[in-house]
Structures are given as structure tokens and as C-alpha cells.
Image (cartoon, rainbow, N blue to C red):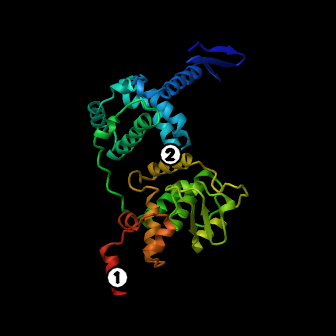
Amino acid sequence: MQKPIQRGKSWRITVRHKGQRYNATRDTQEECIKWAKLKLVELKSLENQSQDQVIHITFHELFEKYYADIGCQMRGASYIKQQLKAFKKYWGDLAQESIHSITPQKITKWRNDRLTEVAPGTVHRQMGLYSAVFTYARKELFLIKENPFSGVAKPAKPAPRSRLISDSEIDAVLAGLNYKHGMVPTKPSHFAAWAFLFAMETAMRRGEIVGIARKYIHEDYIHLPITKNGNPRDVPLTHKAKELLNLIQHTREKLIPHTDNSLRLIWERNLHRVGLNGVVHFHDTRHEAITRFVNQRKLPVEILAKVTGHKTIKTLIHTYYNPSASDIAKMMNA
């Protein structure tokens, strides 16, 4: 690997392997070096594996290659990128260790230490990602024979929330965002409030609402070409949902002038402001909407699954449809 050479405002680097040259041009010297390291890993991993050679790259370098090759194209790319940025902070010295030095014992200690800092659900999700990184190293790059994460137990997933949103909490959220029912949204905070109300009418996820484009809005439903489970979905519109759509006065193609992250930040800051942080989650709107569909619209569960996009009715029943014993008694005696 040669040193990067500056040419004008850019940098160029050359990697030689098995008599072949590979070149790349990048904006900075550091980007050239990073590319060269990952390119060498790729080239070496393609060599005859029968030689049983050991290629040493660090955990951090493996994660960088995983993101560059696979992670950046996944629906969870923003989460993976965030984890990559904070990787050295999360893993400390282990980030710079060879992937062959990462053992189940070290991972177990990391897991236990991490559990003193964040919730079990966070650690569970992080371990799932890191395990996928090592699976990539084993099955695609052929750098290792075993995934060290396979032998380490993940923390138990927290029980699904089954909380509904009270009228007083809805009023507090709207007041904090300076929004009233029937108001035409014009400010970023207004659109956050609008998304909150629209979620309770449609059971749509925050990211799905942010992604609404006018070309997908039909007379009585919204088409979602991309959803969390990977399948497209058509979301039927209630009268209130249509009324909310009619409040949007701008003519831009993208309905909500927010990214998922910007909407999340406005939402979280407002919860702190009105004293509901940790009490109300945006995803609670999905519980609220589903319960309304059953109690007010009398939708059967199998139809409800079509609306919400659940592949299995079991998940819908045990996670989102949360009637109380009193509610069930009223249904039985109706």
C-alpha cells in the first residue's frame, strides 16, 4: 500500500496485490487510507481459503467494512451508522483488537458492563447488530470460523408496552407544540403535532408518516411502498384522517417537512417540556389507534392485521390490542 498522493484538491492511493493495482481517489488522506485497508481485507478474503491463512483486522475495521458493503444499503442504515460513529466509545480498547481476539468471555464482560449504562433492550439490539457483523465476516469474507457472539446470551427483551394515551396527555402534547385541533400546520412543531394526531387515526409508524408522498395518497387510503417488515401496505383513511390531510396546505410532494430524526428530536424535547418524558412514547399512538379500531370501528382482528401490516395475528393480539377485562366484559354483554 503506497502513501496517498495529493492531486489538486483530492487524494489518490494505490494498492498492489498479487501483481494487480487498485486505485481510488478520495477527498482526504484519511479516507484514502481507510479505503486501502478495507480493499486489502476484501482482496485477501477472496484468496483460496484452503490455505487456512489468518487475516488480522480490527473489530472496528470489520464494522466499517460491514457498513460500507451491506449496512449502508439496509433500512436500518441510520442506526448502523450511529453505532459505527460511537463504536470506539462503546467498546473502548476492544474496538482496536483483532477480530480473532474477540472471545465470548470478552463479549460477556462487555455486555455486563454495558447493562450498567443503558437499558437491556438497547444492549439486546446492539448485540444483534454486532453478531450480524461477525456473521458477515464468517459467511461472506471467510475471515473467521466461529461467531463469538453465538455463544453469548442476550439480555431479555423488555415486555412490550401496552399503554394507551389519555385525553389530558394528548392535550398536554399539543399545547407544548403550540397546536390546536383543526389548525393548519405551518411550523415544524405543528407538523410534529399533526403527525401525532394522524398516527392515532391510522396506526402508522412515525417513519411511515414522515415518508408520505402526495403521489401515494388516494381517495380513501394511503399506499406505503416501504414499511418496517419490508412489504408494501395500503392504509385505509378514517373521516378524521381525511380531515387531517385536508389541513396540509403546502403543495410540496413530501407531506411532512421532517426527517425521522428531526421529528424525533422535536417530539422528545416537547415531552421534556411538558413533563411527559418517559411517560408517553410516540409508538404508543399505535396502541391507541388499534384499540380505537376495535372499540369504535368494531374491526375484526384479521382485518386489523391488514391495516397495521402485521404478518402474524399473534403479535398483534399480544402486543398491540390491549382491551381491559372491563372492555371485554362490555363486548360480551353488548
Number of callouts: 2
Percent position of residue 176, x then y? 51, 55
CA gap, disc 2 and disc 1: 42 Å
For the question of whether residue 189 can be seen, the reply is: yes
In the picture provided, is 160 more to the left or to the right than 207? left
What residue sits 58% from the left and 69% below the top? 241
What residue sits 52% from the left and 28% below the top? 42
Label 1 crowd bin: few (<14), some (14–19), many (20+), radius 10 Å: few
In the picture provided, is 182 more to the left or to the right than 84? right
Q: Secondary structure at mark 1?
A: helix
Q: Quadrant of the C terminus?
A: bottom left
Whichever of labels 2 and 1 marks the residue nearer the N terminus, that label is 2
Name the foreground residue: 317 vs 12: 12
Q: Is residue 304 shown above or below 189?
A: below
User: Marks 2 and 1: which is nearer the front?
Assistant: 2
Percent position of residue 292, x then y? 46, 72
Q: Is residue 297 shown above or below 227?
A: below
Q: Secondary structure at mark 2?
A: loop
Q: Which residue is mark 1?
A: 330
Residue lying at the far bottom in this picture: please name it: 334
Q: Which residue is mark 2?
A: 76
Name the foreground residue: 64 vs 151: 151
Q: Amino acid at mark 1?
A: Lys
Q: Amino acid at mark 2?
A: Gly
Q: Can you tell which quarter of the image residue 252 is in?
A: bottom right
In the picture provided, is 278 more to the left or to the right than 64? left
